[in-house]
Amino acid sequence: MPTEKQDQPRNQRRFFLRCLVGLAGTTVAGFAAKRATPQQTVWQIDPSKCTSCGKCATECVLAVSAVKCIHTFEMCGYCKLCFGYFESDAPALNSGAENQLCPTGAIQRHFIEEPYYEYTIDESLCIGCAKCVKGCNAWGNGSLHLQIKQDLCLHCNECTIARACPSNAIVRRPASRPYFDHAALTE
């Protein structure tokens, strides 16, 4: 009959074996649970709901909002008179600051050939105020819209902009497809 001292190594081996089996079971269950969870989502602005209220510039928790103006070039008319670029009562159609709608000069205007100009967004200057978007949607073709830049966003669990948005335009999107296809929304 084995003694208590002889059973001790056998009991220790049994204990460690049970721990390993339990750990393996927990790991497999963890992987299965991870696959079963809903897809990761991120906050985004639905351009079809956005009213260009300007709250994106002031309500973000970041000092400079993660919301930036995006230009859908496929829709742009490359107009000499861009309603997203110029003040409605601009004294001249040139790139003087007094003529520009954007308070930070984030929209850059480049001559292509008469009468065409290309408008690009300098995201480092854009504060997400939506003044250009409002002008473009009111009088232009709607090629300017706002989007939350995912590389800048802190991915807050509850977005402060979403809480303040009067039109509920801030929605959850799959992280694998964080941006709306604005051109397709306007067709």
Image: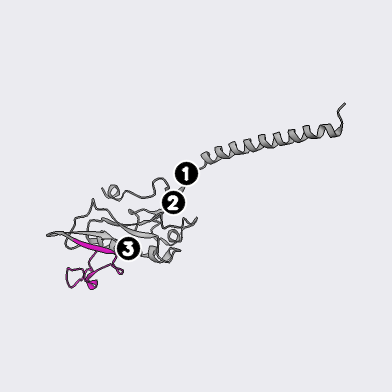
Q: Is residue 93 above or below residue 21?
A: below
Q: Amino acid at mark 1?
A: Gln
- Where is residue 52 shown, x and y percent of the image? 33, 61
How much space separates mark 2 and mark 3, taking CA atoms?
A: 21 Å
Is 67 within the magenta? no
From mark 1 to mark 3, how far is it between C-alphas? Answer: 30 Å
Q: Which amino acid type corresponds to the residue marked 3 in the rendered image?
A: Ala
Q: Which mark is residue 42?
A: 2
Check residue 96 in the rendering and tell me which mark sits there, or answer none: none
* Residue 51 position within the rendered picture, expressed as x and y whole percent measured from the top left: 33, 60
Residue at the extreme left: 114
Along the line of sight, the residue nearer the viewer: 34 or 162:
34
| Rendered view: 122 above or below 9 | below
Quarter of the image where one finds residue 144: bottom left
Q: What percent of the width, then of the height, locates residue 133?
A: 29, 61
For the point 69% across and 37% down, the residue is 19
With 172 as the anchor, is 2 left or right in this view? Answer: right
Between 132 and 126, the one lying in front of the other is: 126
Q: Is residue 151 left or right of residue 143?
A: right
Q: Is residue 99 left or right of residue 164?
A: left
SS type, badge 3: loop
Q: Is residue 84 visible?
A: no
For marks 1 and 3 on the same chain, the one whose residue lies earlier in the sequence:
1
- Near-viewer residue (159 or 53): 159
- The circle drawn on residue 39 is 1
- Residue wearing tag 3: 130
Residue 35 seen in render: yes
Query: Residue 111's image quarter?
Result: bottom left
Q: Amino acid at mark 2?
A: Val
Magenta-colored span? 84-110
Q: Which class describes the residues within 10 Å of circle 2: few (<14), some (14-19), or many (20+)?
A: many
Q: Position of residue 158 (x, y in %)?
A: 49, 57
